[in-house]
Amino acid sequence: MRWTLLLLTLLSLTLLCAFAAADPRSHYMIHCMGCHLNDGRGLPPEVPAFDNKLAILAASDKGREYLVTVPGASQSLIDDAALAGVLNWILATYTEEPVYQPFLESEISRYRYTPLANPARLRDELLGAAD
Amino acid sequence: MKSIFTITLLCLLAMNARSELPLETYGQLTLDTLPQHTLLINTFSHNAVLFNADTQQMLGTISTGIGANAFEVDRKKGIVHTAETYLSRHTRGQRTDVISTYDIRTLSPIGEITIAPKHPSGSPMRHYTGIVKDTEAELMLVANITPAMSVSVVDLQSRTFLSEIPTAGCGLVYPSEKLSFLQLCGDGRAQLVTLNRKGEELSRVRSEIFFDLETDPLMEKPARSEAGWVFNTFHGKVFQVTTEAGKIKISLVFNVGEDDEGWRIGGMQPVAFHVPSQLLLLLMHQGGENTHKDPGTEVWYINLATGATTHRLSLAVPANSIQVSQDESALLYAGSIAEDQVQIYDLKTTVSRGTISDIGLPTILQNL
């Protein structure tokens, strides 16, 4: 009986850990929240706030490339699938309308490894073009 | 009777002596000639102190702003520059970041240049600033972390703030050839940025990936060799990073190795380089994984060309930072925060040459 209980506790702990590791919200807390803060408000202009502008960016190829190549995303210590997961979680959490096309791992891999020199300027260009 | 006479005589003598005491006034001493081994010790106390390392005598103090880090030394002009942050109400209020220039002779500020208020402060670091120059221009670079990374560029001749170069994903400043500088990036690469004399970016390139952030991160505290910069990883790999024709070259110099008994490179300023003998000095401790900030108990002498360990010096007191003077009769310095002292050794004979004490917690050590 005691062994069964121990086994069950271990099993549930393992499951809990596995779930936490794969959970995009946990990834957000570990890899994004330091700068973008707990509610996504960031520290504009250097750290943009997560708001409905994300939806505008996620609606164009150039904007999607931007979202993947900003150093906070591209250089985070998570693999492409996990980065896709946390980006989709950010879009779902901080935009007003649902984003029609989620990021896939393949899209992350395509953009991620080309460094972006000047994110602030590109962001202004992309959002200016969308207005 | 005789004793009364003696006391009266003594009183008269004392009165006479008092009337001859010279009037004491305050003034400023000047450092007209610097000793051969002048050590500039940055401290945790918003200042830096100068010592004659041969006599262990204190020469003076430079008071800096909060968050001052290291100094850019110009021996020819007799000046030093440092990036500082000031708040109008000391701990709060309007923030102003400046590059202050101090006269080495008087240790007083002789000018300042206002820069973007983005200069990082924290535990003292040598590589938040750097100077790049060619035959005509001399630019001082200040790394910014807001946490977005950028570099402020200041023209030291016209004393003007020229530009801010965004360096997303790459940080700090390691001056390279002419008007170019290296940086470290979060993807395991180094970056080389080249400027023109107006402080505008001409080009930027990244190296191959040469370190892994998760399994064996690179420390951001290298020493400048003649050819480039010597960096180390947490596990004890030592790389020399050089540039050639606008490209970054990485070569492995030394590896503590697998059979290492837990020896690691660590501290606040763990690497030094002695140019005349091409000797690389590493501050070592036994501690294994995740001890990269632990003080070192030994200084290992490494031949830069062969990677061979030629000597292991046991420090009397564990040290956080090391530095070496750049002359033939060189002194090796080892600063200890816990003991508030700097040990001095003869680099060649490894004999102790004394100790500087009661500094105010020594951090980064620099030659002046």
Image (cartoon, rainbow, N blue to C red):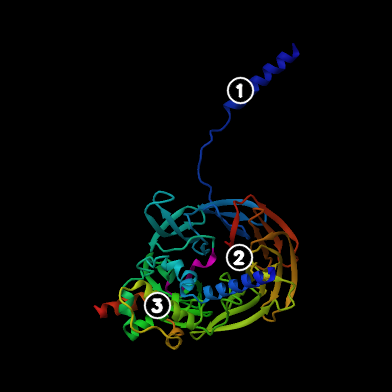
Q: Is circle 2 on the same chain as circle 3? A: yes
Left or right: A127 in relation to B159: left
Q: Is residue B202 visible?
A: no
User: Residue under circle 3?
Assistant: B196
Crowdedness near tag 2: few (<14), some (14–19) or many (≥20) residues, C-alpha within 10 Å: many
Q: Which residues are magenta?
A: B125-137
Residue linked to disc 1:
B15
Say which amino acid is labelled 3: Asn
Q: Chain of mark 3?
A: B
Label 3 and label 1 in one chain: yes
Q: Nearer the viewer, residue A39 or B51?
A: A39
Establish whether labels 2 and 1 are both on one chain. Answer: yes
Near mark 3 (Cα within 10 A), the count class, few <14, some 14-19 or many ≥20, is some
Cα–Cα span, label 2 and label 3 = 31 Å
Secondary element at image label 3: loop
Pointer 2: what residue? Answer: B269
Query: In this orientation, which residue lies closer to the viewer: B361 or B281?
Result: B361
The CA span between labels 3 and 1 is 72 Å
Q: Amino acid at mark 1?
A: Met
Report x, y in % for residue B320: 64, 61
| Subunit that carries the residue with mark 1 | B
For the residue pair B252 and A45, the one nearer the viewer reads as A45
Q: Are marks 2 and 1 in contact (CB under 8 Å)?
A: no
